[in-house]
Image: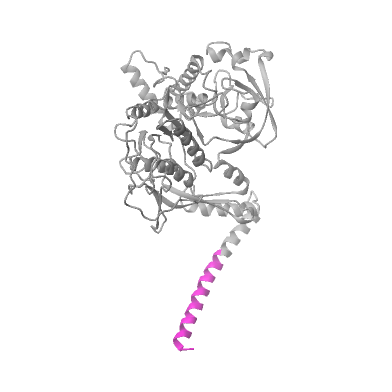
């Protein structure tokens, strides 16, 4: 062997030994820290706790919370269910605590165990398994209602038809109700699958109707989240609208936190011309992957896209792709600005789950979607409404219209959603506003959270209310008047309908395939957005 090769081999061996010695030293330090904590800590941890803590610490050290994180085995199953829109329980949500009685109103989820057991909007929960709920928070109540599948829970209610306060807030409280007026319903917990999409209302067969009740020429698809079934169900809804001769559709992404990338791509595939760019992803080395539509030459829907500040990631991908292609007009308020992709790694030996940010995504125009920690409102991030289509609503109005939308989705053809129900929801919103403005301790904070308001901004909200009261002698600090047209009371939806109504049937849109056809990829992995 030549002398030069011998020297080279010796250098490689020396470097390898040096690296190994440093690695070995760090491993020894980790082992020593573990032994010291296990032996001398006042609260003695188990080895498994120290192991999981080390994994958690490594994930936290990346500085990408909450997107990069370690989920321990005890939470892993629930997390994997959560990202698929599933949970074990009775299927009640959108709770509202009535301050004067301590009971809870709720909205039952579509096709849930609660619906099948006979629970309905307007019923008031009094106790769960003989435990009175008057002093419980919403989180505590949720904990009582969720549990293992195939187990029973006893829910005592005051039926809405026996509850005078559902009609009149000044009526006697449930404390004055006789035991005979209370009803106990046994619900068997099951795996509840939340609908990834919904329509305007349900028909008599409990199927979604994807057209607006008063405008059957306009489709409406609310996309709640992006799970494995979202793309397929949206495709089926669009095909149903096509069969009905509907060519205008509202896609509602408000409050949608995102989900799986393939399902966002699948929706774009239904609406964009073959070859149109959907999104571009980039890893830390700048390597780009272009995802493009590859299904139809064109599909002739005119689209209005509803977004708000809670529309994130996958929602932003679809909104940006349709907007950049000239296929969809975006209505509402600026989106959240989450332009990163996470991958999930299930660790061996049932050691938990690692969720890690692995790439960023960029809209077809090349503009950034991600809002960094130091970003300002003037920076380029998120998706903005088209010029002339920004429609802001107050937190109270947003809270109210969400109640209207949820209640409409529980009643076949909304036949029972009458003036009594609207009046009830208006009074409840007024009550929350009053608690917020009067500053009633913890109640005030609960009211803020219910209305989606940052408690740190309560002072500015109160001041705004006082200023409005000074400028309008007829207004009061507790009054609430819903905006928008009945039966939705949704100014953002009204604007979307106004836009679609202005388009004549047969109007063309810019659906031509772009000349730029870089690397085509269907995005067929399970990246989470």
Residue in the image at 32% along x and 17% along y: 470
Q: Which residues are magenta?
A: 1-26
Residue occupying the far bottom of the picture: 2
Q: Where is residue 84 drawn, in percent x and y?
A: 55, 42
Q: Position of residue 54 (x, y in %)?
A: 57, 54
Q: Is residue 113 left or right of residue 518?
A: right
Q: Is the image coloured rainbow, by chain, by secondary structure, or in one colour?
A: one colour
Prevalent SS, magenta region: helix
| Vertical arrangement, residue 511 with respect to residue 497, above or below | below
Image side of residue 149 versus residue 338, left or right: right
Residue drawn 42% across the image and 55% down it: 283
Residue 4 in the magenta stretch? The answer is yes
Check if residue 115 falls in the magenta segment.
Answer: no
x then y, percent, for residue 499:
34, 29
* Position of residue 446 measured from the top left corner of the image (x, y, whole percent): 50, 28
Please name the residue shown 57% across and 51% down the image. Answer: 353
Q: Quadrant of residue 388?
A: top left
User: In front: 460, or 478?
Assistant: 478
- Say which of 447 and 167 sits in front: 167
Question: Is any atom of residue 307 visible in this view?
Answer: no
């Amino acid at each position: 062997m030549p002398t030069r090769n011998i020297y080279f081999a010796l250098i490689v061996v020396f470097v390898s030994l040096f690296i190994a010695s440093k690695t070995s030293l760090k491993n020894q330090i980790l082992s020593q820290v573990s032994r010291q904590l296990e032996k001398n800590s006042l609260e003695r941890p188990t080895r498994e706790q120290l192991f999981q803590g080390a994994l958690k610490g490594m994930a936290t050290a990346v500085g990408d919370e909450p997107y990069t994180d370690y989920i321990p085995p005890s939470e892993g199953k629930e997390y994997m269910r959560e990202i698929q829109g599933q949970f074990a329980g009775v299927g009640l949500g959108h709770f509202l605590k009535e301050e004067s009685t301590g009971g809870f109103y709720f909205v039952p989820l579509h096709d849930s165990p609660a619906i099948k057991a006979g629970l309905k909007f307007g019923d008031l929960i009094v106790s769960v398994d003989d435990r009175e709920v008057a002093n419980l928070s919403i989180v505590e109540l949720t904990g009582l209602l969720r549990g293992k599948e195939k187990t029973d829970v006893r829910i005592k209610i005051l039926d809405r038809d026996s509850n005078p306060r559902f009609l009149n807030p000044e009526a006697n409280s449930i404390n004055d109700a006789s035991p005979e007026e209370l009803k106990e319903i046994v619900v068997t917990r099951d795996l509840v699958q939340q609908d990834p999409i919904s329509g305007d209302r349900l028909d008599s067969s409990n199927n979604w109707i994807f057209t607006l009740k008063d405008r059957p020429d306009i489709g409406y698809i609310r996309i709640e989240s992006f799970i494995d079934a979202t793309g397929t169900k949206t495709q089926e809804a669009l095909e149903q609208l096509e069969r009905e001769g509907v060519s205008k559709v509202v896609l509602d992404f408000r409050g949608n936190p995102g989900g799986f990338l393939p399902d966002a791509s699948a929706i774009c595939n239904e609406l964009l011309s073959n070859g149109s760019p959907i999104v571009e992803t980039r890893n830390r080395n700048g390597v780009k992957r272009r995802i493009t539509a590859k299904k139809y030459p064109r599909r002739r829907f005119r689209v209005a896209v509803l977004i708000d500040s809670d529309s994130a990631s996958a929602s932003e991908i679809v909104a940006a792709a349709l907007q950049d292609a000239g296929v969809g007009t975006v209505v509402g308020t600026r989106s959240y600005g989450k332009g990163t992709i996470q991958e999930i790694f299930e660790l061996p030996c049932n050691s938990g789950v690692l969720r890690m940010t692995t790439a960023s995504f960029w809209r077809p125009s090349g503009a950034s979607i991600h809002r960094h920690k130091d970003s300002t409102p003037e920076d380029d991030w998120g998706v903005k409404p088209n010029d002339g289509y920004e429609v802001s609503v107050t937190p109270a109005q947003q809270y109210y219209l969400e109640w209207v939308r949820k209640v409409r989705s529980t009643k076949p053809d909304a036949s029972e959603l009458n003036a009594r129900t609207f009046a009830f929801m208006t009074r409840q919103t007024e009550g929350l506003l009053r608690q917020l403005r009067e500053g009633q301790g913890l109640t005030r904070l609960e009211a803020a959270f219910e209305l989606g308001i940052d408690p740190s901004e309560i002072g500015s909200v109160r001041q705004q209310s006082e200023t409005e009261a000074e400028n309008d002698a007829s207004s009061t600090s507790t009054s609430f008047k819903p905006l928008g047209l009945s039966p939705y009371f949704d100014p953002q939806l009204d604007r979307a309908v106004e836009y679609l109504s202005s388009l004549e049937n047969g109007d063309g849109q810019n659906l031509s395939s772009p000349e730029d056809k870089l690397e085509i990829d269907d995005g067929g992995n399970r990246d989470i957005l």
